[in-house]
Amino acid sequence: MTEALGRRRPFQGLTWGAVLLEGRAFFALLAIFIVFTILAPQSFPTLSNIIVMCQQVSVYAILSIGMLVVIMDGGIDLSVGSTLGLSGMVAGLALQGFPVGGVILYPPVWVVVILAVAAGALVGLLNGVLVARLNVAPFVATLGTMYVIRGLAQLTTNGLTVNNLSGKPELGNTGFEWLGFNSLLGIPIGVWIMVVVSIVASLLLSRTVYGRWLYAQGGNRRAAELSGVPVRKVSVRAYVIAGVCAAIAGVILTSELTSAGPTQGTSYELTAIAAVVIGGASLFGGTGNVRGTLLGAFVIGFLAAGLTIVGVSVYVQTVFTGAVIVLAVLLNSIQLRSRRPKPTSTPIAPPPAGGGTGDAEAEPATAGSAG
Amino acid sequence: MNGQTREPAGERPVLSARDIVKNYGGVRALKGVNFDVYPGTVTTLFGENGAGKSTLMKILSGVEKPTSGSIILDGEEVEFADTNDARDHGISIIHQELSLSPNISVRDNLFMGRELSRAGRVDDKEQERRSREVLAELGVQIAPRTKVSELRLGEQQLVEIARALLADSRILIMDEPTSALSANEVGILFRVIDDLTAKGVAIVYISHHLEEALQVTDHAVVLRDGAMTAKAAAADIDLEWIIRHMVGENYDLGSPPDGYEFGPVALDVQGLSVADPKEPARMLVDRLSLQVREGEIVCIYGLMGAGRTEMLEAVAGRRPSVGGTVHVRGGEITHLSLRDRLASGLGLVPEDRQRDGLVQTMSVGRNISLANVSTFVKGLFVSRGKERAHIDDAIRDVHVKTDGGGAPIGSLSGGNQQKVVIGKIVSTGPKVLLLDEPTRGIDVGAKAEVFKLVAARAREGLAVVYSTSEVGECLSIAHRIVVMARGRIVAEFGPDTPKEQIMAASGEAVVAA
């Protein structure tokens, strides 16, 4: 978990139990894959189904990576589902054009995407300022913004869905569907974006100063502050990253659905939290990585898709998803317990030659004498 | 049982541990220890960190089970299921870490887990009466209904002790009971210990404060590396004997570094004031001025609550000040943030290394490099080569005993953890180093190493402010000793001042047991 410098022999002393525990998200995914391959050999393990499943997962995965950054800081962001919805609305409305002084301006698609992402970043900035500068508890602050942002998304159209996202060639704003429908080398654009976001986030966390600061202040904020880490700035940026990720997910989802609905992404924040937890991150902060979170998102996504394919009802699916989350948290706490530091001795002086009870200078009588 | 005498000869031990072995995974924490406790006496367990003292006490009080060996209580072999079971057998422990709930009252804490009830309801009145009684016995003025969070650390420790007294134990284990107590409170505790032993209670005492422990104890038992190395009656031994058996060789903490000239003033604090956040009219630090020159080591001596920590935190930018200025090498830093003060050469090693010094989720190496990590950037990323070189240098420089930079921070002993915290700050190349009780809870050997480190840096021109509540430390390290009381500097001494004089200046009565 901690990418230690001076890597210690990775497999020495590892039991099978420890390997299973460390790689639990991976093994869970493997197990899900094997089980559904057996249950539905015709439909589950096909290339086309896998591609469809990956495309579904990509939205959740991008959202979860943003959530991971906030959770590693020791916070939480309940507003990402709403942010996803708002960004979709921003994109949808921007494609309808802005009336400026009697004429309607139609921004090109890349401007639309930038506007949507900027909206997400702004929501993140609001969350970050509330949490890190104004010291509102993350849960409460983002619970509040969750409602506010959802309300704003609905106000834009009074709750109506924006359906016409194709644009017109003569207006120069076509191509928005490209994100959700097209493929590159047989792989959907959404999946490519997920890959890019993952790589960027992974490098950010493991190789940059920002990542190091995030791990440090998530682990012990006071110690990080005394070591010169600009803790507030790092926290604000964490929420901005979460907002940007939510917006990217929102743009992809809107493009896939070819409609922008103000209720899009409702309760997605909970799925994102679940993916992060299944991926092994601690809600107390300081631990976690992108690889684990990705696996977590895939576990949830593949489980849901597999259950649908074998014809299990939505209600049963919900029960399964919940059980997986509880199991993941249970394993996290087992792992935490087994990692508890063991007492070690300080070898300052060589041990005494005798080693046993040593010199008894005033050995009291023990046996035979009744007190 | 004959409880009046403090001579064990002929007495039967009330509690014996025989051939106790305790393994944690591959680590053998105890290697066949024999340990006896006699009624009506105090037995002190001496040993460095990691020697196995706390492990042995955990076994005697039912917190942990031995890997092998037996515990004999009143001549019968017993096995404790848990701490409650041990308490039912008359064995109580006062833990080193406080185990009170801060959000509820002193009274409710005292009776937690064994509430007195009448007609199915908690008998608050009776609990309050008994709380009052036991607190009076301890000579402290705490209302039973005060919330624990409103008490000072020392007072909380006294509540912890009161709780153990209420249990009416025959055997009372005290693990570092005085670490947060003032000299006055220590005096009270020692009086209570005398009362208890007079009643026939057996006391097992653990303390890093060797002199203090020697004062109160009847027997001394020394542990080293999980084995008992010596035991003796207190009357037959002295401090030097204890240290010799603890460390295995003669250890001298030495004297302040000399043979060089101090440079110009490096740290200049003028009229610094810090207000009590709970009571803004009260000053924790009151118009304090202090100058420290390059190469000089100044000790700030004082009791708990004298304002030492608050002063250092305000100088470092951790705590807001309400007045005064701070200059480092002539440049004013009063309005800079903690981060900017660190960058301009002022580093603080905090008092509580677990809470403020270390990131437990990171490796030894990453803890060391944390304060410097932004200087290793190459392009967008942290250069692994530069970072590794920095870590290796720092580990060598401050003599951290570790398997390497990748080892988890929790695998180090307390002393080595402290060296990591010091190494982290020192490697930023500070001009002024503030050390707040850097030797708290670390053993004699590590203490000597910390002193050597500080002395070597001072020789190179580092100005050091060293806060401590142990006079002996001041005399071994400081060029100048500044005594603080109630937020002010009340006296200043040279390095050859008698201990008593320094202690008297702090308002500390010399402890009489």
Image (cartoon, grey):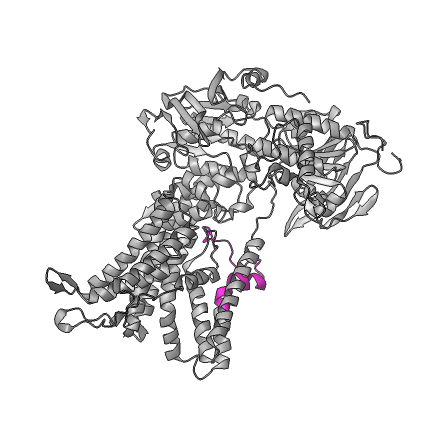
Residue A4 among magenta residues: yes
Image coordinates for residue A53, horizontal then vertical, percent: 39, 74
For the question of whether residue A58 can be seen, the reply is: yes
Query: Looking at the picture, does residue B396 appear above or below residue B495?
Result: below
Q: Quadrant of residue A194?
A: bottom left
Going by the image, does A208 lie left or right of B435? left
In the image, which residues are magenta? A1-28
What residue is at 65 percent from the left and 29 percent from the top? Answer: B243
Image coordinates for residue B464, horizontal then vertical, percent: 44, 26
Query: Looking at the picture, does residue A90 appear above or below residue A360?
Result: below
Going by the image, does B287 lie left or right of A240? right
What residue is at 43 percent from the left and 22 percent from the top? Answer: B286
What residue is at 38 percent from the left and 42 percent from the top? Answer: A229
Indicate the quadrant containing the C terminus of chain B: top left, top right, bottom left or bottom right: top right
Q: State the residue lying farthest toward the bottom.
A: A42
Between residue B475 and residue A86, name the one nearer to us: A86
Image coordinates for residue B109, horizontal then vertical, percent: 63, 40
Between residue B32 and residue B177, name the one nearer to us: B177
